[in-house]
Image (cartoon, rainbow, N blue to C red):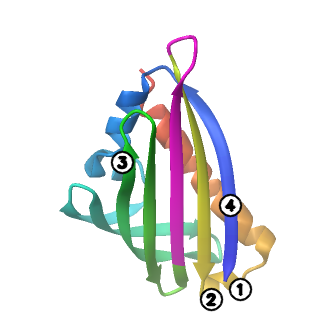
Amino acid sequence: MAVMEFKGEFEVRTDPGTISSFISDIDRITSIIPDVQSKERINSSSAKLIVKAGQSAIKGKFNLLFEIKNVASGESAEISAKGSGAAGSLDLKAKYSFSNVSNGSTLVKWVVDLKIGGMIATMGSRVLNGTAEKYISVLTDSFRKSFET
């Protein structure tokens, strides 16, 4: 099993409540995930997704249960995605915290813990880490751009 952690932060010109509202809406938050092949909404905080992920030799479709958890309005939120595909399994946990900054913007800090198992985990750690980092970067950019006008 490969275990990775990624951290970062970005600033957006909106208030923490708007960000909290976005991340706690299952339809809006799943709309920024790249390469979603299908989505089945289970309830207001969870959905089943089929997502195509990866690059070159390490890509495939994953059946995921995506869940929004522990939303503290205007302060923090957590999401998780857990599932498997032909190439292996993944378990992603992301934590976000939001805080006002002096110019009317919000600082979003995030930490993503990712566990990958199965055949896909046998790839070299440099290749696997680079692929995961690229995918998380795309997700983070999509999240940030959701608040730009």
Residue 29's disc is 3
The answer to whether one can see residue 106 in this image is yes
Residue 75 is covered by the magenta coloring:
no
Q: Which residue is mark 4?
A: 5
Residue visible at 59% across and 57% down in the picture: 112
Residue visible at 43% across and 54% down in the picture: 33
- Lower position in the chain sequence, tag 4 or tag 3: 4
Q: Main secondary structure of the magenta part?
A: strand
In this rendering, the answer to whether 6 lies above or below 54 is above
Are discs 1 and 2 less than 8 Å apart at CB?
yes
- Lower position in the chain sequence, tag 3 or tag 2: 3
- Lower position in the chain sequence, tag 1 or tag 4: 4
Q: CA distance from mark 3 to mark 2?
A: 29 Å
Q: CA distance from mark 3 to mark 1?
A: 30 Å
Of tags 3 and 1, the one toward the viewer is 3
Q: Which residue is mark 2?
A: 119
Q: Which residues are magenta?
A: 90-104
**What's the residue type where badge 3 is placed?**
Ile
Residue 122's disc is 1
**What's the residue type where badge 4 is placed?**
Glu
